[in-house]
Amino acid sequence: MNFGRFSSYEGFLNELEAFHGKKAPGGVLGLQMVNLAWDLLPKGILMDVICETRKCLADAIQLLTPCTVGNHWLKIVDTGRFAVVFYDKQTGEGVRISLNMEEMKRHAAVNEWFLKLVPKKEQNLQAILDGINEGGASLFNHCPVTVDPEVLKARPKVPPVICPGCKEAYPPFHGALCRGCQGVTEAYFHRRPQ
Ligand SMILES: [Zn+2]
């Protein structure tokens, strides 16, 4: 088991709590998934990641790898599934790791937590974490994948322009107006009188 920039499992778990807010079992599943990816992928590649959920899994990936949402080496494609694609950013070749729901059943505490079969106050966090670490790589399915070339394209580095609609700066390749003013991005707030 490799803990990335942490020297131990406890070190990772403490930082998960500090960063994510709690010792989330999903973060420990993430630790197992990242380790499986390191085992499966060729050594020495520059690895990018696509995470299929916005939950704790994405936070674990940011703690364990150089890939963050902010540096774009981690992208979120929110299918809502507990799955991650780890791939070579040059070739797009990689592996998709997902939960094996049949194997999960062998670890009752993990299965009950994940499927929310038991009220939270009746769950035993230590039993869940122990179950994940006992299960290890067996908890997952993995298959080789090639990421769509569109995803690999570098974002153009061009100076922002001022939107005629809102007078805020935005990337010019978004169009004649910013995405907010185009209504492409949902209107997620209403202005209140000042
Ligand atoms: Zn605008």
Image (tube, rainbow, N blue to C red):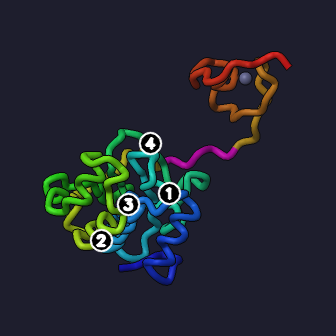
Query: Mark number for residue 150?
Result: 4
Q: Which residues are magenta?
A: 153-157
The image's mark for residue 25 is: 3
In primary-sequence order, the first of circles 1 and 2 is: 1
Q: Look at discs 4 and 3 and give the one toward the viewer.
A: 3
Kind of residue at badge 1: Asp
Q: Position of residue 47 (x, y in %)?
A: 44, 64
Q: N-terminal of the two: label 1 or label 3?
A: 3
Taking the image as shown, residue 22 lies to the left or right of residue 51, namely right
Nearest the camera: 116 or 148? 116
Mark 1 and mark 4: Cα distance apart in space:
25 Å
Q: Residues within 10 Å of mark 3 (few under 14, many from 20)?
A: many
Looking at marks 2 and 3 on the same chain, the residue that comes earlier in the sequence is marked by: 3
Q: Residues within 10 Å of mark 4 (few under 14, many from 20)?
A: few
User: Is the stretch drawn in magenta largely helix, strand or loop?
Assistant: loop
- Relative to the observer, which residue lies in front, 107 or 156? 107
Quarter placement of the C terminus: top right
- The span from disc 2 to disc 3 (Cα, nearest Å) is 10 Å
Disc on res. 130: 2
